[in-house]
Amino acid sequence: MNAPAVVGMPLSAVETPALLIELDAFERNLHHMSTSLERTGVRLRPHAKTHKCPHIAHQQQALGAMGVCCQTVSEAEAMVWGGVRDVLVSNQIVTPAKIARLAALARETRIAVCVDDPQNVQALSRAASAAGAQIDLLVEIDVGTHRCGVAPGEAALALARAIEAAPGLAFAGLQAYHGSAQHTRNFGERRQQILGSIRLAEETRDLLRRDGLECRLLSGGGTGSYLFEAASQVYSELQAGSYIFMDGGYARNRSECGGAFTDFEHSLFVLSTVVSRPVAERAVVDAGLKSLSIDAGLPEVSGLAGARYTRAADEHGIVMLEGDACGIRIGEQMRLIPGNCDPTVNLHEWYVVVRDGRVVATWPIVARGPGY
């Protein structure tokens, strides 16, 4: 599909709805994360499920990222084919076809994947051996999310031993990610939840060490908690992803002083156009469910005081207006801040990258899709 913009055109000429990156804010986010980790000894392995774009992954690596995380084999393939040479699939891959594709990737570059089941270990071992490849495995432990992962401690040790004994595999370490804590709004509560996760990860790492199993990687962390894991002296790499875009969900987190979480700036927007003004207090824009995810709440209108996005249909968004916002006209553009950047990105094929009101690049979102 053709991109909704061409380089050099003014923002006003961009076809909507379009996924917009404000380049100055985006670059500041990249640099802030990089400099925040410089003195900690912790490396960044940003999550590519956020951006799904090798071009962005290369920018992250240019600032020190060691590689990327992916959540699906198709995302991993897109990253490897786009030139990224170190990929962790921070998920369980269990079907034979997906395992075979993962083993094929491991012939080309370093591939790691998470496991929480001994039968899955054996299936990965058979595929790696058949492909003449080696796959690094991380034992995922449940440190509070209650999703995937074995219990910390002895269960993790038993699974690590099984990996060590399996041909074609190498035990690489632990995956310890507390996803549900990322959006705990209160700073103190969020810190306590993550400190509990860090303790479980450290205890499990030390247990494995006493058994002679070294964790080369202890991976986890996210945008909402990155400073806690970075300061822990337990984690070796952090998997923050949304920091590059700073969606509405993360913006609702609170800082230590109780104010807004301002570590990162909004750099991702869905650019929409007003297509109807049926009454003075209501505008209708062309960005609805096909261009915005609302699982983390409705989008916020950026830069237009008195405008509130209240309802989404397939092709339309309803925006209620008051005060000066009532002056907006049909054909004018409106920027929307998505509540959750990851699934919103997945709805689009291109980023339109702008600086100073003009398009400077278009980047394809090559890893979008259902994640087969």
Image (cartoon, helix red, strand yellow):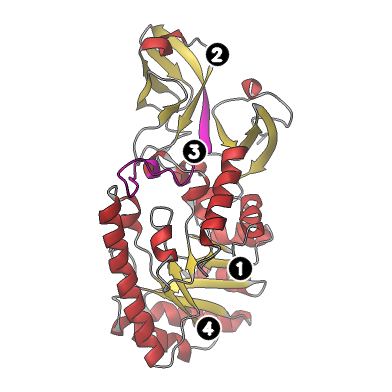
C-alpha distance separating marks 1 and 4: 16 Å
Look at mark 4 in the image and give the residue it sits on: 169
Q: Where in the figure is residue 56, as x and y percent of width and height?
A: 62, 50
Residue at disc 3, secondary structure: loop
Among the two numbered marks 1 and 2 on one chain, the one whose residue lies closer to the N terminus:
1
- What residue sits 74% from the left and 28% below the top? 8
Residue at disc 1, secondary structure: strand
Q: Where in the figure is residue 103, as x and y percent of width and height?
A: 58, 74
Q: Are marks 2 and 4 in contact (CB under 8 Å)?
A: no
Left or right: 246 with respect to 194? right
Q: Nearer the viewer, residue 253 or 74?
A: 253
Occupied quadrant, residue 5: top right
Among the two numbered marks 3 and 1 on one chain, the one whose residue lies closer to the N terminus:
1
Disc 3 or disc 4, which is closer to the eye? 3
Which numbered tag is attached to residue 313?
none
Which numbered tag is attached to residue 331?
2
- What residue sits 35% from the left and 54% below the top? 182
Q: Nearer the viewer, residue 347 or 251?
A: 251
Q: Nearer the viewer, residue 258 or 61?
A: 258
